[in-house]
Image (tube, rainbow, N blue to C red):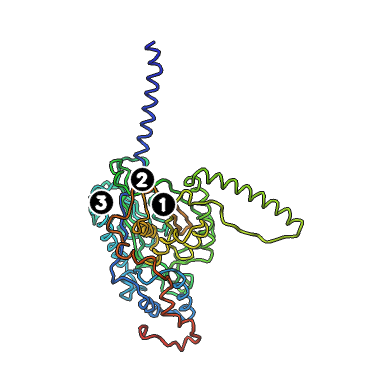
Amino acid sequence: MESFSLIYVVPTLYLCFLLWKLFDRKRDRECYILDYQCHKPTQDRMLGTEFCGKIIRRTENLGLDEYKFLLKAIVSSGIGEQTYAPRNVFEGREASATIHDGISEMVDFFDDSIVKLLARSKISPSEIDILVVNISMLSALPSLSARIINRYKLRHDVKVYNLTGMGCSASLISLDIVQNIFKSQRNKLALLVTSESLSPNWYPGNNKSMILANCLFRSGGCAVLLTNKRSFKHKAILKLKCLVRTHHGARDESFGCCLQKEDEQGKSGIFLGKTLPKAATRAFVDNLRVISPKILPTRELFRFLLVSLLEKLKTMSSCSSKSSSGGGKIVTKKSPLNFKTGIDHFCLHTGGKAVIDGVGMSLDLSEHDLEPARMTLHRFGNTSASSLWYVLGYMEAKKRLKKGDRVFMISFGAGFKCNSCLWQVMKDLGNGYGNVWDDCVDDYPPESLVSPFMEKYSWVNDVEDANNIELPDFLK
């Protein structure tokens, strides 16, 4: 009888051991954020409305048409007058930047964000196991990741990944690299460094599709500390639930809508084509199609299925009636999916007012949901890949993030790419220090988001003769 019992007990215990081992291994594959630090450049790098006018005034090859176009672009962009630019712009050398300008811009960012992050987290640089750096528009030799290793004396065996050319969606690409390493290696600390070097990338020409980038992009950056160490779980602020990447580079239209190239005069810049909104929409829809089943509750997916079937039957019946009546209008409707059933906060890429409006309309978001992205765009502008972390910082500063909340991040980038991920908040946030919003969050949202540029430069629209422009005193 005892031997008979052993036949059942031993395999059962072994099965329990295997299940426990599998569960234990999965716990070591989680991806946590311990802390992050956004970069706030110094006050002497802040772009006011008058100084912006001086930059445009001293740019050669710009005429009255370009002035009116730039005014319309900056007014409709949603960007305020407290954003930041590289130092060479204030020195009047934006059209003749050097490699040193780009590197020094990045060093300023490193010495602010990385130093503050490691000091606050009480993590020594020698404890970092993985370093991922993404700065799209500057490829220096040695690499920027090598400069970080040299400057802060990281270990000789640190695993390094240096990404360029990934555009505004690079943060989540870097995060995906870290996440995949964490799945195969235990007890690791990763430093993710994301920014954009604007110094060597000013466009000095007059092609309207290329001068638009000068209006939208601003200086910024963020350093993020991640881990899969179980012993650090109690210190973590966010836990990664899932991440989805979508790349439409195989489509010529998507590939060519955002390019770095020379214009007809040989001047280099970023070309933003008219097909960009269409490419972004396609990538966005395909990305949502993949991530929705991963982040929404079953009841919402089931409801969506029923609504879709009803819509399909309705469409089929209307098509049959149109064939007999001779035609009719095509009506487009929003998706019946309610993303708020699985998401508490929406962290949107601040690519511009039109981008925020478009995503908000697609997901049927309220102004409360869009406020963090709108305020980030107004205060810091489009800081490229790091913009998501400024939006997250706004949510934290406003004490919106509570334990158990789910935060959805979505970004777009050249290629064309759309990347998204879902985070779970591990504890109530907003009581820390070092947030770039701390000194101004009480001023947001402002009573009005009317652009100060229109108030100061609206007279440009009244000018008809380019040879008879009477300039204000501050532009003379």
Rendering coords of residue 273 (x, y %): 51, 66
Residue 147 at least partly seen: no
Q: Residue at x 37, y 73 (%)?
A: 95
Identify residue for label 3.
Answer: 121
Q: CA distance from mark 2 to mark 1?
A: 15 Å
Q: Quadrant of residue 437?
A: bottom left
How far separated are the C-alphas under marks 3 and 1? 22 Å
Residue at image coords 35%, 74%:
48
Q: Looking at the rendered structure, which numbered label has been put on residue 156?
A: none
From the viewer's perspective, is residue 104 above or below residue 59?
above
Q: Which mark is residue 407?
A: 1
Name of the residue lying farthest toward the bottom: 468
Q: Secondary structure at mark 2?
A: loop
The C terminus is located in which quarter? bottom left
Say which amino acid is labelled 3: Ser
Local crowd size for mark 3, using a 10 Å CA cut-off: few (<14), some (14–19), many (≥20): few
- Where residue 411 appears, as percent x and y from the top left, is 44, 57
Which mark, residue 31?
Answer: 2
Label 2: few (<14), some or many (≥20) within 10 Å?
Answer: many
Of 424 and 181, nearer the camera is 424
Give amino acid for label 2.
Answer: Cys
- Judging depth in this view, the residue of 207 and 25 nearest the camera is 25
The x, y position of residue 36, in whole percent, is 31, 54
Q: Quadrant of the N terminus?
A: top left
Q: Earlier in the sequence, mark 3 or mark 1?
A: 3
Q: Amino acid at mark 1?
A: Val
In the rendered image of this protein, does residue 168 appear above or below residue 10? Answer: below
